[in-house]
Amino acid sequence: MRKKKEILRLAAVVFCALCFRANAVFGEDAREEATQGELKLEGKYIRQLTLERREDRNRVDFDQPGESIKVVVGKYLLREVQLEGGYACRIWSDANWVEVGEDKPAVLKVGAPLKQIVKATRQGRVLSLDYKLLGIGGESYASPDRSKPPAFTAYKGDKRIASGTFEYG
């Protein structure tokens, strides 16, 4: 029984030493030595930005990123943006990758100014309105506060003829 405990203790020490060595090789030290590139953000009022790195599918968050950020050279996908004021955008598509190199800064269009788009379609006597709030890169934003849906008012000249709110969905 005593030999078994000594063998387990020795195995634990060896395991810890291997873990420490692996962390030194693959952990923080390796990330600091990785080549960095610049990603310029061509938008404003970004509170938080989440990117996904193509090579390892790891997500990286940036709080208050400003006009540019430093990232490890590689391809990135925009996954989430939160703007000041509460508007947020989540992107599920893998279509638009941005490549960050070490020589020339990459540019990502995201954030404000925002553009409100209303598409009206008529079906007989019914007028359907579709509302979108788009960022500078075409990304779609929504407010997490569902208690105040977007509203509209229609005028004919100076006379108000209709008003209402949009449904989410």
Image: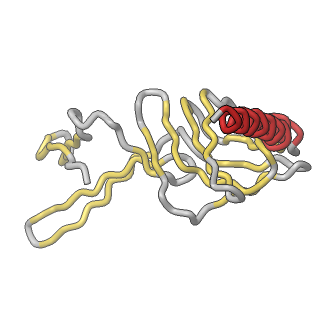
Across and down, in percent, residue 14 comes to: 79, 38
Q: In the orientation shown, which residue stands out farthest toward the front?
A: 1
Q: In the orientation shown, which residue stands out farthest toward the left?
A: 125
User: As rendered, which of 67 and 81 lies closer to the eye?
Assistant: 81
Across and down, in percent, residue 18 comes to: 80, 40
- Residue at horizontal 42 percent and vertical 27 percent from the top: 85
User: As rendered, which of 102 and 127 lies closer to the eye?
Assistant: 102
Quadrant of image for the N terminus: top right
Asked whether, in this view, residue 26 is left or right of residue 166, the answer is right
**Colour scheme shown:** secondary structure
- Residue 132 visible: yes
Q: Is residue 94 above or below residue 31?
A: below
- Residue 38 visible: no
- Residue at horizontal 49 percent and vertical 36 percent from the top: 82
Count of numbered circles on the image: 0
User: As rendered, which of 53 and 124 lies closer to the eye?
Assistant: 53
Asked whether, in this view, residue 121 is left or right of residue 57, the answer is left
- Residue at horizontal 16 percent and vertical 62 percent from the top: 127
Asked whether, in this view, residue 89 is left or right of residue 35, the answer is left
Q: Is residue 165 above or below residue 122?
A: above
Across and down, in percent, residue 119 comes to: 31, 59
- Residue at horizontal 12 percent and vertical 46 percent from the top: 162
Q: In the orientation shown, which residue stands out farthest toward the bottom?
A: 124
Q: Is residue 38 above or below residue 76?
A: above
Across and down, in percent, residue 118 comes to: 32, 54
Quadrant of image for the C terminus: bottom left
Q: Quadrant of residue 40?
A: top right
